[in-house]
Amino acid sequence: MVNKAFLKKNYLNILMICLLLLIVFVPSAKAFMLRGLMEIGLFRPGTTAATSPEAMPPAANLNGILFKDINGNVVDLGRLKGKVVFLNFWATWCPPCQAEMPSIQKLYTQFKDDPDFVFLLVDADSKLPEANKFMQKKNYSMPVYELASNIPEQLFKGTLPTTIVLDKKGRISFNEEGAANYAHKKFIAFMQQLKNNKD
């Protein structure tokens, strides 16, 4: 009798504790919650304060930073000068990475046929078969790579997810650690602006 009364009285508290435990111990539940928060307008990428040109590394510093796809094709970051590069470091087990993936897929779908844009999704664990299997399971079509060389801390300090956008001169124009909604209209406008910049 006491137990039933206790349960009835504390039903909402018990429900909240169960929900919290689910979010803490089930990565896909945490990713689902983060994705929901993105949809209501939280986790917008901050595109207003791009790195100042003096602080941006010149394109020459990017030469020799290599990425390899599952077929062995190698991309040299330094050779992508003249293109806007969207570079995302992620892992299959990372809930914030999973949460932002649908927005990256939308962004990729919008720009994939434009030769001025290159998308590099880099599996930080360097487990390409597993990463590609994850992409297929989720019906994502983004190209997945692994590191094929050392990478400077300026680009990746180890936080997942990390997203870098390089302008056409190879300068870091955007650097975000943590999940964000890359399908947001302000970010899309930012990408278009980088494409149209002449300097």
Image: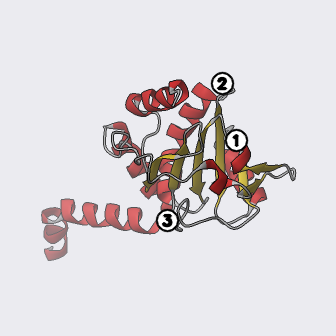
> Badge 1: few (under 14), some or many (20 or more) residues near its Cα, within 10 Å?
many
Tell whether 24 sits left or right of 75.
left
Residue visible at 40% across and 44% down in the picture: 50
Marks 3 and 2 close (CB-CB < 8 Å): no
* Inter-mark Cα distance, 3 to 2: 29 Å
User: Which residue position holds label 1?
Assistant: 80
Tell whether 169 sits left or right of 2.
right
> Regarding mark 3 in the picture, which secondary structure is present there?
loop
Q: Is residue 40 above or below residue 113?
A: below
Q: Tell me the amino acid under the disc marked 1.
A: Leu
- On the question of residue 3 being in view, the answer is yes
Q: Tell me the amino acid under the disc marked 3.
A: Thr
Q: Position of residue 79 (x, y in %)?
A: 73, 44
User: Which residue position holds label 2?
Assistant: 114
- On the question of residue 139 being in view, the answer is no
Observer-side mark, 1 or 2, equals: 1
- Sequence order check: which comes first, mark 3 or mark 2? 2
- Sequence order check: which comes first, mark 1 or mark 3? 1
- The part of the image, by quadrant, that contains residue 83 is top right
> Badge 3: few (under 14), some or many (20 or more) residues near its Cα, within 10 Å?
few
User: Which residue position holds label 3?
Assistant: 159
Residue visible at 54% across and 32% down in the picture: 106
Q: Is residue 40 above or below residue 3?
A: above
Observer-side mark, 1 or 3, equals: 1
Q: Tell me the amino acid under the disc marked 2.
A: Asp
> Badge 2: few (under 14), some or many (20 or more) residues near its Cα, within 10 Å?
few
